[in-house]
């Protein structure tokens, strides 16, 4: 499979090039140029097929021009030491738990595969890369954990001093080894600006192999399609029988997760369609309902990883549907959930089902319920993606349920480790000095 920019279909690159460049030079996003048919493989998966086997098979088939089977297997074995799980909700709603990875959020799947692929590609060429990433909290910890201990790769995380939660800060600053945490005297926008300036700085570019690991990278997007296939395999009543009609409901912010599901469907996954669930940052739902796209500044909500006013993957989704609103709305419907409704849903799910969900998952669960109400007696199954562990959003979950969720040990154990960060000014000079002194 080869990839092309959404803005210039003649700009064709390999997976490896896409992984190391992130964004296309023309500012577009990379999308597959061909549509492989994996439907026979999807059908052959059963409830017993291990998640790891699904990932290896899909990696080997999707990237067969670039990776032999052994390489695909190495990448996946290193990346996926954890698996999704499909659990029962009520009334035809199933929940796909994606928070069993190192940072307890679904971003672990993408970050881990990206890190593992880069390690594979670097091994071949014996090169060294420096991953530079700015974080407002959560993405940084998934990236830091994913890249920690990888050969020939160093990671530099910039975070705004005093503006991330104590747990998030510990997650970023206690790994050591090849992960450096820069505590920037400024806000998240300063961190992002410094990273952007570093990528275009001629001196830095000539002396270091700077690479990004942000969420638009294909190396993070493609592996997110694997768990859609896993969910489908778990719906099957038996190995040779197909499940009934099913939809996926995806709590969305930057819409990478939803894009990955849409890609899996183009490769033959027999999902009826998708529900794009958002909080009040509803530019995409608005587009789906009236065809008008108006990006605007984001508003703060309980489901803060979805507070996005101009989702970067929207361009990708439009491109996949041939820029046709009719085609997109034929496959994707929308639901918008407010903070009050989110809190109410967290409380109700605990009361009725004894289930603790984080606010992002709650947005998805309410959206799925509404969708089912609009389609009564159709005997549908909705798979709602659960994107984070409830323990990561302790205050709101406790407020809504009266119960304090447990923090998984892999998160709580960092609280006792000493913080190691380097405090720097919010300027490109300060960042350059650190990078060149440390890596040049
Ligand atoms: C990033 C994130 C989302 C949104 O995912 P997108 O791919 O950006 O749409 C949802 N929930 C959680 C917990 C996240 O961290």
Image (cartoon, rainbow, N blue to C red):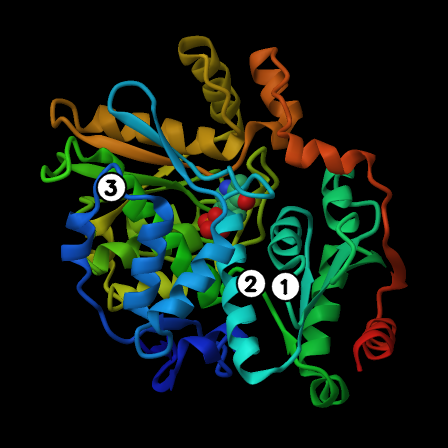
Side of 314 relative to 264 (left or right): right
Cβ atoms under marks 2 and 1 closer than 8 Å: yes
Residue at 22% in and 31% down: 381
The yes-or-no answer for disc 2 within 8 Å of ligand 1 is no
Q: In the structure shown, which secondary structural element does the residue marked by tag 1 occupy?
A: loop
Q: Based on the displayed image, in which of its 4 quarters is residue 430 positioned?
A: bottom right
Q: CA distance from mark 3 to mark 1?
A: 32 Å
User: Looking at the rendered structure, which numbered label has been put on residue 266?
Assistant: none
Q: Earlier in the sequence, mark 3 or mark 1?
A: 1
Task: Read off the residue under disc 3.
Answer: 232
Task: Read off the residue under disc 2.
Answer: 115
Could you say which is closer to the camera, residue 236 or residue 32?
236
Side of 281 relative to 133 (left or right): left
Q: In the structure shown, which secondary structural element does the residue marked by tag 3 occupy?
A: helix
Graded by Cα atoms within 10 Å as few (under 14), some (14 to 19) or many (20 or more), the crowding at tag 1 reads some
Q: Based on the displayed image, in which of its 4 quarters is residue 237 positioned?
A: top left
Task: Read off the residue under disc 1.
Answer: 150
Could you say which is closer to the camera, residue 270 or residue 280?
270
């Amino acid at each position: 499979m080869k990839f092309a920019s959404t803005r210039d279909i003649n700009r064709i690159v390999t997976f490896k090039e896409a992984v190391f460049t992130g964004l296309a030079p023309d500012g577009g996003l990379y999308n597959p140029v061909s549509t492989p048919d994996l439907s026979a493989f999807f059908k052959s998966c059963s409830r017993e097929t291990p998640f790891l086997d699904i990932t290896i098979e899909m990696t080997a088939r999707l990237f067969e021009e670039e990776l032999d089977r052994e390489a695909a297997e190495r990448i996946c074995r290193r990346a996926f030491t954890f698996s999704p799980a499909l659990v029962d909700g009520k009334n035809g709603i199933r929940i796909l738990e994606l928070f069993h990875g190192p940072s307890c959020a679904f971003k672990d799947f993408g970050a881990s595969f990206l890190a593992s692929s880069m390690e594979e590609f670097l091994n071949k060429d014996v090169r060294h890369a420096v991953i530079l990433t700015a974080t407002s909290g959560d993405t940084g910890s998934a990236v830091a954990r994913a890249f920690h201990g990888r050969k020939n790769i160093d990671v530099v995380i910039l975070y705004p001093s005093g503006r991330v939660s104590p747990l998030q800060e510990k997650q970023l600053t206690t790994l050591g080894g090849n992960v450096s945490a820069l505590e920037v005297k400024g806000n998240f926008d300063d961190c992002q600006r410094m990273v952007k300036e570093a990528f275009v700085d001629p001196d830095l570019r000539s002396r270091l192999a700077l690479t990004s690991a942000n969420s638009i990278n294909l190396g993070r997007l493609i592996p997110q399609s694997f768990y859609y296939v896993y969910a489908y395999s778990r719906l099957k009543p038996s190995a040779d029988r197909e499940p009934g009609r099913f939809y996926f409901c995806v709590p969305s912010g930057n819409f990478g997760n939803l894009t990955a599901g849409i890609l899996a469907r183009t490769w033959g996954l027999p999902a009826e369609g998708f529900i794009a669930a958002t909080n009040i940052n509803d530019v995409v739902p608005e587009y789906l309902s009236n065809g008008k796209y108006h990006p605007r500044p984001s508003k703060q909500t309980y489901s803060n990883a979805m507070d996005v006013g101009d989702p970067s993957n929207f361009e990708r989704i439009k491109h996949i549907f041939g820029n046709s609103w009719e085609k997109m709305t034929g496959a994707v419907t929308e639901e918008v959930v407010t903070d009050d409704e989110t809190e109410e849903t967290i409380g109700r799910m605990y009361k009725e089902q004894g289930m603790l969900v984080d606010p992002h998952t709650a947005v998805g669960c309410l959206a799925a319920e509404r969708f089912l109400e609009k389609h009564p007696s159709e005997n549908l199954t909705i798979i709602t993606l659960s994107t984070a562990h409830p323990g990561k959003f302790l205050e709101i979950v406790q407020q809504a349920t009266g119960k304090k969720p447990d923090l998984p040990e892999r998160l709580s154990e960092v609280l006792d480790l000493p913080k190691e960060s380097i405090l720097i000014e919010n300027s490109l000079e300060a960042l350059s000095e650190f990078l060149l002194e440390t890596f040049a």
